[in-house]
Amino acid sequence: MAPEHLRKLLGDIPAPVLLASPAVADGIDESLRYLASDEALASIAADTYRPKWNSPWWHMLLLHELGEAGRIPQRAVRAMMEGLARLRIHVFPVRPEDTPPGADSYRDSLCHCALGSMTQLLTACGVDVGTALPWTVPWFARYQMPDGGLSCDTSAYLVADECPSSMVGTVAPFEAVLDGALSEERRLFLTRAAGFLVARRLVLGSPTKHNADERTSAPAWRLPCFPRFYFYDVLRGTSALVRWALVSGEAIPLAGVSLAAMHLARAYPDGVIRIGRRVRRLDHPPACERRLGATAGVPVRAARRDERRGRTVPDADAPLERRAPRPDRAD
């Protein structure tokens, strides 16, 4: 597609204004009340992460997606930072020697998706994450693969004959690094990660044998999902890549973005993104996620987190990327 054709296609899309319903506002308030409670603090003290999909971690991430991170009670933010600081493993445990004696390589560590997501949230809450949790500073560059991507599958780092990086494992770290001041190391990380997204054209699964499952998941990426949490979709990838271009001043190769941009423009010509995929069918989701079932879509041009208030339409759930099997984590 010629640049002028794509420019016209995007330029013809209207920019509708959508307002959150009272039900969404009530759900947000309910989650905020929970995060202000002693019950939430006790949950964070017991385990920052679990129970998966229902703990304060997930309430906080969902509020961040809705642009409401600034309203999260500060004592919950402090409790989360203190809980992360108490983790016994401050690296991604690829090899047995990465786990100290008596530690659990699953429960006492983070993956790249988790750290990337929580780094963004804490930054949005006004936290200087690098100062509060200094072990996070070199993390993403340390685990960047030769093609610029990352993977939350520990075994991927032991593969010698191919580079089984992952879109899911890359996008949250990419977004997180975009939030900070750009040192030379961070700029290099972003340039390489952007190259990875461009090479995948924002829509392609891994060509490797080790990560062949990603090719099965890739068709679902064209369906915007909500809540995103750790999942990938083309709107998320496109938004992140455009943000990188604005921050860095670099141009995005047309071939790297045209498939995703054409898909979004043709699928949502009225300018409203309609959610096509739910990441999980939660038994007891945060209240603001439950109440979003009655909400309309989001503007194509308004791809910021605070405007992703979409109607949840159950569809085929794409499988989450996994590390090595973690029986305690329903990933």
Image: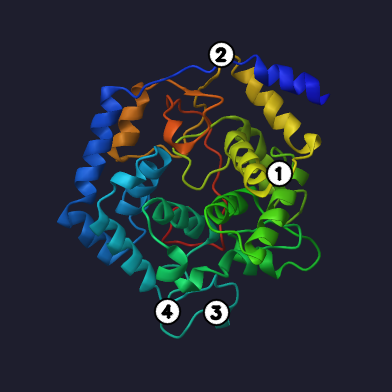
Label 3: which residue?
98
Q: Residues within 10 Å of mark 2 (few under 14, many from 20)?
A: some
Q: Residue visible at 55% across and 73% down?
A: 93
Secondary structure at numbered mark 3: helix
How far separated are the C-alphas under marks 4 and 3?
Answer: 10 Å
Three-letter code, disc 4: Ala
Three-letter code, disc 3: Asp
How far separated are the C-alphas under marks 1 and 3?
Answer: 29 Å
How far separated are the C-alphas under marks 4 and 2?
Answer: 52 Å
How far separated are the C-alphas under marks 2 and 1?
Answer: 28 Å
Mark 4 and mark 1 residues within 8 Å of each other at the beta carbon: no
Q: Earlier in the sequence, mark 4 or mark 3?
A: 3
Q: Quadrant of residue 193?
A: bottom right
Viewer-side residue, 88 vs 271: 271
Q: Earlier in the sequence, mark 1 or mark 3?
A: 3
Q: Residue visible at 19% across and 44% down?
A: 33
Q: Is residue 57 above or below residue 81?
A: above
Secondary structure at numbered mark 1: loop
Q: Is residue 109 visible?
A: no
Label 1: which residue?
205
- Judged from this view, the residue extending furthest toward the bottom is 101
Mark 4 and mark 3 residues within 8 Å of each other at the beta carbon: no
Label 2: which residue?
270
Place of residue 36 in the rendered image (x, y in percent of width and height, measured from the top left)? 20, 51
Q: Residues within 10 Å of mark 4 (few under 14, many from 20)?
A: some
